[in-house]
Image (spheres, rainbow, N blue to C red):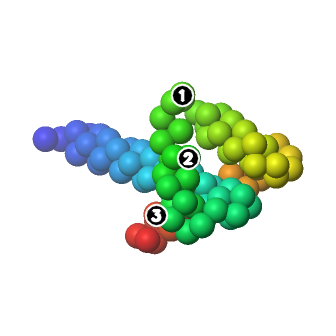
Amino acid sequence: MTTFDDREKGFETKYALDQEQEFKAVARRNKLLGLWAAEKMGLSSDSADQYAGAVVKADFEQPGEEDVFRKIAQDLEGSGIVVSEGEIRRKMDELASIAREQIRNGE
């Protein structure tokens, strides 16, 4: 192998690792978001964990994060909780940062 081949393989490996970590961070963010919404809705601990799992699964319905946003917004509204779109999106951004940090730290 040449130095170029070694370097290319290194970049491919790093890219694959970065993609895996981002996937884990998004799933972690969705779980944290589900737990946040469950707390707002007053769900019990067991119900909150189940709800957070449902939020994680909701992300697989469509590409992007709109399916997760829609689920959270509809469920909060259905529970009579008034939360603005901006508040949900800010929480999503905040929890994304926290989730990425947790994944980087091996949590």
Residue 103 is tagged as: 3
> Residue at the spot x=72%, y=39% of the render?
74
SS type, badge 1? loop
> Please, what is the three-letter code of the amino acid marked with disc 2?
Val
Q: Quadrant of the N terminus?
A: top left
Report x, y in % for residue 25.
50, 54
Report x, y in % for residue 53.
49, 52
> Label 1 to label 3, Cα distance in Å?
24 Å
| Among numbered discs 1 and 3, the one appearing first in the sequence | 1
SS type, badge 2? helix
SS type, badge 3? helix
Task: Identify the residue under disc 1.
Answer: 62
> Residue at the spot x=55%, y=69% of the render?
45
Report x, y in % for residue 105.
46, 71
| Among numbered discs 2 and 3, the one appearing first in the sequence | 2
Local packing at callout 3 (Cα closer than 10 Å; few below 14, some 14-19, many 20+) is some
- For the residue pair 107 and 78, the one nearer the viewer reads as 78
- For the residue pair 57 and 1, the one nearer the viewer reads as 57
> Label 2 to label 3, Cα distance in Å?
19 Å
- For the residue pair 44 and 91, the one nearer the viewer reads as 44
Task: Identify the residue under disc 2.
Answer: 55
Can the viewer see residue 19? yes
Local packing at callout 2 (Cα closer than 10 Å; few below 14, some 14-19, many 20+) is many
Going by the image, does 88 lie left or right of 95?
right
> Please, what is the three-letter code of the amino acid marked with disc 1?
Gln
| Among numbered discs 2 and 1, the one appearing first in the sequence | 2
Q: Give the answer, above or below, for where 74 lies relative to 97.
A: above
Going by the image, does 42 lie left or right of 47?
right
Foreground label between 1 and 3: 1
Q: Give the answer, above or below, for where 76 lies relative to 43.
A: above
